[in-house]
Image (spheres, rainbow, N blue to C red):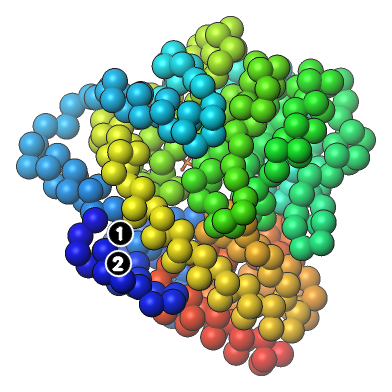
């Protein structure tokens, strides 16, 4: 990283992450959503920070090179992914298990297309990332929502409810791990139990692990579901991507890991002619961040951890709100059902704070706050929320 990026940070600050480009007016999905320029955006999961300096340099070099033809994953990129799985998760994978894709949403839609038939049921633990809720209907399958439960202050899977909900028509579980929006990192024991459940009921799992490198709690660890045992690996499509961690969603690069060769062949067949390979630049940048992005990622985690603590403390001081400490992701989930307003999302928007609406995740009355912004923007957002609550 550059000198600026390497200079020492004081608590809650870091010169690299404190300074971001002005995104308003750049056709940014996040910043150009609201007609009223007073509204600050804390909704969609993209961060305001510049990507690692090595990414910016690689984009400059590609521009200077000037040719933008098709690309393919380099052997180095494939090796890096394999090594990453081994080092981080003690998970041994093979090159042929990796299927490169231009995004995660298409990747889990493909999983449903691969496995189920019209009329089949798809389990998902809610609240959850909105495209999980709409994916089953794309293939005339039926979503079966199983509510997450609170264990103290931590949201987790309700295994009794899963057992009650499952029928012979349940063919697939769409699993978000770590979980968006509640930020839970599932433990090895929970994953073991989930694996047993899926084996017992002959269910295929599509495990969306896009947030797996964004663990904020230092005592939590990510375990890919498929690394738990060979039996669950055999029926799991694991999805990962550098896009959330390194803020590259605009470059469309993700990958599925499928150890079961028959399942992998069906998955590839389901994508044929419909879902293209990732763009060349997406592959190049995946290699760049996996090889060189770790110092940046560590500093980002420190910055986000401070943002999380600030949001957690301040939101929980506001009457009517309960915020949950996200163990992973840069998204804080908030219960606003005790706030005496009809629509909490619209209420805060009127007071200049654009949040995600819990209704979109399957649970009205909740809100999601994106912490992937400068400390000063977060402070301004929290000040506005406090003033809004105090105005009631
Ligand atoms: C759990 C989860 N999956 C997928 C995505 C989106 O992935 P993509 O933009 O690659 O389709 C997000 C984005 O926030 C997400 O949180």
Task: Give the residue furthest to the bottom.
Answer: 391
Residue 272 versus residue 103: which sits nearer the camera?
A: 103
Name the residue rendered at 63%, 41% in the picture: 176
- Give percent across and percent down for residue 257: 51, 23
Q: Which class describes the residues within 10 Å of circle 1: few (<14), some (14-19), or many (20+)?
A: some
Name the residue rendered at 26%, 34% in the picture: 284
- Give percent across and percent down for residue 75: 29, 20
Q: Which residue is mark 2?
A: 16
Give SS at disc 1: loop
Q: Is residue 209 visible?
A: yes
| Direction from residue 53 to residue 152 in the image, left or right | right
Q: Quadrant of residue 77?
A: top left
- Give percent across and percent down for residue 109: 57, 29
Q: Which residue is mark 1?
A: 50
- Give percent across and percent down for residue 105: 52, 36
Q: Quadrant of residue 101?
A: top left
Front of the two marks 2 and 1: 2
| Direction from residue 12 to residue 315 in the image, left or right | right
């Amino acid at each position: 990283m550059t000198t600026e990026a390497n200079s020492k940070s004081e608590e809650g600050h870091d010169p690299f992450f404190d300074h971001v480009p002005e995104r308003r007016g750049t056709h940014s999905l996040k910043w150009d959503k609201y007609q009223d320029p007073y509204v600050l955006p804390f909704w969609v999961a993209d961060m305001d920070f510049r990507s690692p300096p090595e990414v910016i340099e690689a984009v400059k070099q590609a521009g200077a090179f000037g040719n933008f033809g098709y690309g393919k994953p380099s052997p180095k990129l494939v090796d890096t992914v394999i090594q990453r799985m081994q080092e981080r998760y003690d998970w041994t994978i093979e090159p042929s298990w990796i299927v490169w894709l231009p995004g995660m949403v298409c990747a889990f839609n493909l999983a449903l297309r691969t496995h189920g038939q019209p009329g089949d049921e798809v389990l998902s633990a809610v609240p959850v990332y909105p495209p999980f809720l709409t994916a089953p209907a794309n293939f005339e399958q039926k979503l079966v929502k199983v509510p997450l439960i609170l264990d103290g202050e931590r949201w987790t899977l309700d295994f009794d409810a899963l057992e009650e909900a499952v029928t012979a028509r349940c063919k697939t579980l769409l699993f978000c791990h770590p979980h968006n929006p509640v930020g839970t990192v599932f433990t090895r024991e929970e994953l073991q139990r989930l694996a047993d459940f899926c084996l017992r009921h002959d269910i295929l799992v599509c495990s969306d692990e896009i947030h797996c490198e964004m663990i904020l709690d230092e005592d939590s660890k990510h375990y890919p579901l498929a690394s738990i045992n060979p039996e669950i690996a055999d029926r799991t499509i694991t999805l990962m991507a550098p896009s959330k961690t390194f803020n590259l969603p605009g470059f469309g690069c993700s990958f599925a890991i499928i150890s079961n060769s028959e399942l992998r062949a069906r998955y590839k067949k389901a994508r044929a002619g419909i879902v293209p390979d990732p763009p060349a630049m997406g592959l190049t940048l995946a290699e760049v961040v996996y090889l060189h992005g770790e110092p940046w990622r560590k500093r980002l985690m420190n910055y986000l951890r401070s943002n999380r603590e600030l949001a957690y403390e301040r939101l929980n001081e506001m009457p009517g709100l309960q915020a949950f400490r996200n163990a992973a992701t840069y998204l804080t989930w908030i219960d606003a059902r005790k706030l005496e307003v009809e629509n909490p999302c619209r209420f805060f928007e009127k007071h200049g704070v654009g949040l995600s609406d819990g209704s979109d995740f399957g649970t009205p009355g909740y809100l999601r706050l994106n912490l992937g912004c400068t400390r000063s923007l977060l402070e301004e957002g929290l000040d506005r929320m406090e003033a809004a609550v105090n105005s009631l």
